[in-house]
Image (cartoon, rainbow, N blue to C red):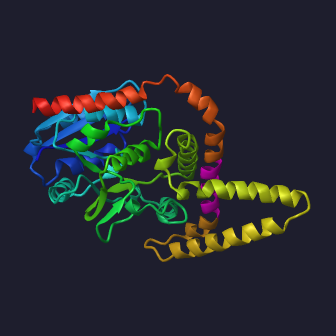
Amino acid sequence: MIVSLCMIAYNEANAIDGLFKDISLQEYPHEKIEVVFVDSMSTDATHDKMEEFKNTDYGFLDVKIVRCEKHNQAYSWNAALKTATGDLIIRVDAHARIPNNFVSRNVYNIRRGENVVGGGRPNISSNVSSWKLTLLAAEDSLFGSSIAGYRRPASEKEYMDSLFHAAYKREVIRKVGGFNEDLGRTEDNEFHYRIRQAGYKLCCCPDIISYQHSRNTLKNMVRQKYANGKWIGLTVSVCPGCLSSFHFAPFLFVIALLFCIVSAALGQPLMLYILLALYGMFDFVNSVSCFAMKNIQPQFLLLPLIFPLLHISYGLGTVVGLAQIPFWLRKIKNSPAKQHIEEVKQKIAENTVKR
């Protein structure tokens, strides 16, 4: 089985060295691996490092580098899909690390009858410090990040609504097409929604694992949560079915908090006290649970402040996203996104015939 291992990047020169090493050490036969890199016109050394990897003889079937003018994840992933010629197409993020058996375990599970597979994707931190380990603890916590099962190592095979670093049989892409380029941050949700609607299942396998670098500063983490929340709000207008109720928990918390603050200002503080007490209880319990993790740090004492900051940032982002829907819909009214989805279908079919 020929495998296309795809990665997109924009100014990721400081992040990709580890992943490139991981790719070079894959135990799956290199002559059956096609590596596809997409560079979104990086201004740092990202492209140079891609060229260096390509010019090093690792014995791969091929190493292809595509340059995209748009700094749009969905656009770049579509470029990767149009370039890939493998029977199996694997998506790997630039901020990822993968074990030596990553490709081989994906192939193994596909050969057992699955169409889309993936595995747990826990967070890791680079250049470890006490503060970065604290942020990692917040990101790893169910309370601070997400209940999504794929974020943690799987204990048994399970079918999920979405996967990270997933592997897709070629026929899946040929049927559903590419990513919706109108979306940012939620392009995965919408893509996997169409895959499920087409009758395919997304299998999270216990023997597949990869790792994702978490944000190393609180500022970047807050920005990430705000942007995630904003795109949840905007996506409601185009594909509400690809979102779950859990995506709106921070939004509901922010709305409830604002309502209670107004009520308190009008002389009715009881609801604010109740809301703060309930949230404080969950905040305290989940902060204490982080002390059961490895690598406990003194800064863990700040987790009760970090958690609400992340939740409020995400919730405010959703509020802003919902408010911007009318303007955003006008902006994308004549967007070629649907056309590009179909173009991916056509290109996948053409490359299949060529093989």
- Vertical relation: 65 (above or below) 185: above
Predominant SS of the magenta segment? helix
Magenta stretch?
A: 305-316
* Residue 212, percent from left and from top: 37, 54
Is residue 48 visible in this depiction of the protein?
A: no
Q: Quadrant of the C terminus?
A: top left
Would residue 265 be counted in the magenta stretch? no
Horizontal side of residue 340 vs 104, given as left or right = right
* Residue 334, percent from left and from top: 49, 22
* Figure disc tally: 0
Depth check: give the residue in front, 127 or 251: 251
* Residue 306, percent from left and from top: 61, 60
Horizontal side of residue 22 vs 232, given as left or right = left
Horizontal side of residue 199 vs 296, given as left or right = left
What's the residue at 50%, 66% (across, down)? 142
* Residue 115, percent from left and from top: 23, 52
